Image: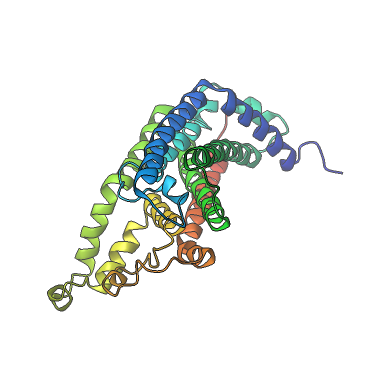
Amino acid sequence: MRREGSPRRGVGVVFFRELFDHLTSVRMLVLELLVVLFGAVVVYFAAEQIRNTTAEDPFLFLRLFAPPGQSLLSFVTVLSILIPLIAIGLGFDAINGEYNRRTLSRILSQPIYRDALLFGKFLAGLATLSICLITLWLMVIGFGLLRLGIPPSTEEMGRMLVFLLVSIAYAGVWLSLAMLFSVLFRSTATAALSALGLWLFLALLWPALAQVVGEAISPSDIRFTMIGIPTPDTVAWQQGLARISPGTLYGEAVVAMLNPEAQSLTNLLAQFQGRVLGAPLPLDQSILSAWPQIVSLIAGMILLFVVGYIAFQRQEVRA
């Protein structure tokens, strides 16, 4: 028989309490409304473009998420911006909020362990994000059925399902980061600003810096430059540095899932060998192509959570 104060029981109590707070909070309702509003507008314009310009396309439903010729106005682009904002909004005050309300010591005085508290809060935040993303995903599919008048194929459903799972993993990375800052900083404002600042740096500045740093580490070979081909070593360094950003990993995985014609994600030389765009890849080959990016997102989520867990275990909690 399991004793009353077991960590497993504590995780369940914290999970359901936090999940209820998230789903009923005004902050979450505002974020959900924001996501639905932006997503509906973008998908509506994508559907209209598909109806007007696409004659025969075996992956018609995938174009709702990433319509051709709309790099800035696409569902994926909007989602890549809103997911970090929602995740940071859920996690930036997960621990320091309890400190500031002076409720942390009272919670831990109950038969709830520290690891159960942190793990339960993380699971509740991830479940909340999953509910939002699944709801939005189903809304897009339903809207596509109404506007396009045809059901998605099995191949498209498989790709859209993997895209959903990748989006949840991407949200988990930013939730773990927000909770890490919530553990490290006692001020909720400092935690929120730090998380938002790091997101803006990785999303806007780091891709350009990665190109410069990669060029400095491994300069381009003049022999490749003369024939218009990037230097392999330089490209490898630039891509490796760029993939420090979760947004880059998410973007590459999404390209593999929503663009079956993308046959190479890691080798820019393939562009000059005619191997990037061609016959659509089957679903299993696309998953294998994006597997390193998917694993990296999951590993990043776990790593950030473990760092926050260690920091939280070493903190002193006073009444």
Residue at figure coordinates x 51%, y 42% from the top left: 149
Q: Please state the horizontal and vertical placement of residue 70, each as a whole percent of the image.
A: 31, 46
Q: Please state the horizontal and vertical placement of residue 185, each as a whole percent of the image.
A: 43, 34
Q: Identify whether 218 is placed above or below 315.
A: below
261 left or right of 231? Answer: right
Of residue 309 and residue 270, the one placed in the foreground of this image is: 270
Q: Identify whether 280 is placed above or below 139.
A: below
Residue at figure coordinates x 51%, y 20% from the top left: 26
| Total number of numbered discs in the rendering | 0
234 left or right of 109? Answer: left
Q: Is residue 216 visible?
A: yes
Residue at figure coordinates x 38%, y 64% from the top left: 265
Of residue 272 and residue 44, the one placed in the foreground of this image is: 44
Q: Please state the horizontal and vertical placement of residue 21, each as a whole percent of the image.
A: 60, 25
> Quadrant of the image for the C terminus?
top right
Q: Identify whether 15 is placed above or below 98.
A: below
Residue lying at the far right of the rendered structure: 1
Q: Please state the horizontal and vertical placement of residue 33, each as a whole percent of the image.
A: 47, 26
Q: Is residue 186 visible?
A: no
